[in-house]
Image: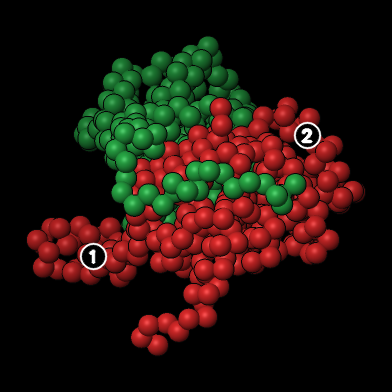
Chain colours: A red, B green
Amino acid sequence: MEARISLRDVHVEFPIYQGGSRSLKKNLLWRGTGGNVARDARQRTYVTALAGLNLDITHGDRIGLIGHNGAGKTTLLRVLAGVYEPTKGRMRVEGEVCPLFDISLGMELDASGYDNILLRGLYLGLSRREIQDRMPAIADYTELGNYLDMPIRTYSAGMKLRLAFATSTSVGSDILLIDEGIIAGDQWFLAKARERLGRVVDSSSIMVLATHDSDMLREWCNVGVWLQAGRLMQCGPIDDVLCAYEEDGTKPRQGQ
Amino acid sequence: MIEGQPVSESVAIRLVSAPILDDWAMVRPPGYAAAGVQDLSGGLRRWRLWTRMALEDIRQRYRRSMLGPLWLSLSMLIMIGSMGVVYAQIFKVSVHNYLPFLAYGLLFWTLLGDIVREGCQCFTQYEGILRQIKLPLSTHVYRMIARHFLVFGHNLVGCVLVAVAVGGVPGPAAFLAIPGLFLWAINAVWVTLLLGMTSTRFRDMPPLIASLLQILFFVSPIMWDPATLNGRFSFVTFNPVYQFIELVRAPLQGQAPPLQSWLLVGAMTLVGWGITFPFFARFRGRITYWL
């Protein structure tokens, strides 16, 4: 079965609870007094992160999410990962999803590198056995050698990243979701990661990457999805979308 | 290779402005109740993950201390020993009878307190995981309960040792505690779910629950024997904490649990799930938004 993702009119609105709306006591007081006391219990605003997104992603697509900060890139990734259920609209995903958002998933600082590979693997849905089978390959890829026996508290950020990246990309999922933060390694690692992602993406069928790095987007992605304020601005071959996005960036903004 | 791959043809039709009604994406998702059941059973199927995480939680907490998880039981034993001697004098009962009663009472109270107190943090504590990866939400609930029962197992050994030391060897009736503990586990799931959900939405829940627990400790027969009330305060019968504790304490002290304990705990199980399940089914998808 081929991996595939479809979004239809997907909305995501975050409730921002302020003042008393976080308090049970105030909410009860507000209800109990017919809304006369503790009025701040109703204080809440909604932030629209995604507004009516329609998208079809199919086998072989390597999507680059483009947009300013707060455009909804990360939210979209999390919706695709199933973390946030759309507040309105429908989404359907076929295939195993592997999110690569944050290196800290399942990390126990006092446990050894090997233990952490196991924990992360379990989170990602592998069985203990499957992880043991992959362990030599993962350990080899991280190039951490004897460090793997030490608690990861002693690791540098780059080393933790290598460990997390090696484990996550060895799962063999159909859909790989990557947020840019995780990719911030050194040049040597980036080259290695790129090579591996190339293979992983060939075997898994969809990748969605959110980043501001246009070189990386050109190199890693074939489809660009440009988001602005939670809406789809443009979608198509990566070069076209990047051109349009960069052109837009040089245009003077309305009302400025 | 990444370069030179053709852009898939579907790009052209991606800019759909209006939703198409009968397409693949529009297949009806499962209803609230079905999704709720799927979450609870899907979490159970992840038992390898949550048992491992529960173990890891305990190892993590005591990794750097010399006695390790033994600290857990040791601190409880010290409490039982010191309280036992003092209160046996106050209540004018023999230490031999009082100590096992107090030990088992505190043992189960500790379990109950852990379930309730930490249940409030069930989702806020694992915020980092919830925001990153889609797991059945019940996975976190099971993880937490597994951890409580692991600690309980530790403490149980200590308390049995105390009882044996003063001559109270558990008899065959102790096996009756097993179905009782099973009921405890089933109830722990709804308690954790309900408290976890409400505390994620309303951040003033945990302190509220903590003060409630403190009151419950003193009004429940843990330090004092309800028999000393001489039937004057029959409201103790309707204290769910008492019935839950009696259900498992009585077998360890060599008696079958009274029928009223089975009935009241059974009723609590039904009522608790009757309230929690619809609530969970309805708001399951909102929990990550509340974090």
Q: Which chain carries label 1?
A: A
B54 in relation to A106, above or below: above
* Left or right of B215 on screen, residue B117: right
Of residue A81 and residue B197, the one placed in the foreground of this image is: A81
Looking at the picture, how far across and down is residue A202, in whole percent? 69, 40
Looking at the picture, how far across and down is residue B134, in whole percent? 51, 42
Q: Which chain carries label 2?
A: A
Q: Name the residue under label 1.
A: A41
Q: Which residue is drawn at 55% across and 23% down?
A: B168
Circles 2 and 1 in contact, beta carbons < 8 Å: no
Residue at the extreme right? A146
Q: Residue at x 43, y 56 (%)?
A: B291
In the picture, the disc for residue A134 is 2
Q: Residue at x 36, y 35 (%)?
A: B23
The amino acid at mark 2 is: Arg
* Left or right of A234 on screen, residue A215: right
Looking at the picture, how far across and down is residue A253, in whole percent? 42, 82
Q: Please, what secondary structure does the residue beneath circle 2 have?
A: helix
Residue A173 occupies which quadrant of the picture?
Answer: top right
The amino acid at mark 1 is: Ala
Q: Alpha-carbon distance for marks 2 and 1?
A: 52 Å
Whether residue B163 is visible, yes or no, is: no
Of residue A47 and residue B79, the one placed in the foreground of this image is: A47
Residue B56 occupies which quadrant of the picture?
Answer: top right
Q: Tag 2: Cα neighbours inside 10 Å, few (<14), some, or many (≥20)?
A: some
Of residue B4 and residue A161, the one placed in the foreground of this image is: B4
Of residue B110 and residue B276, the one placed in the foreground of this image is: B276
* Left or right of B19 on screen, residue B66: right
Q: Which residue is drawn at 36% across and 46% down?
A: A8
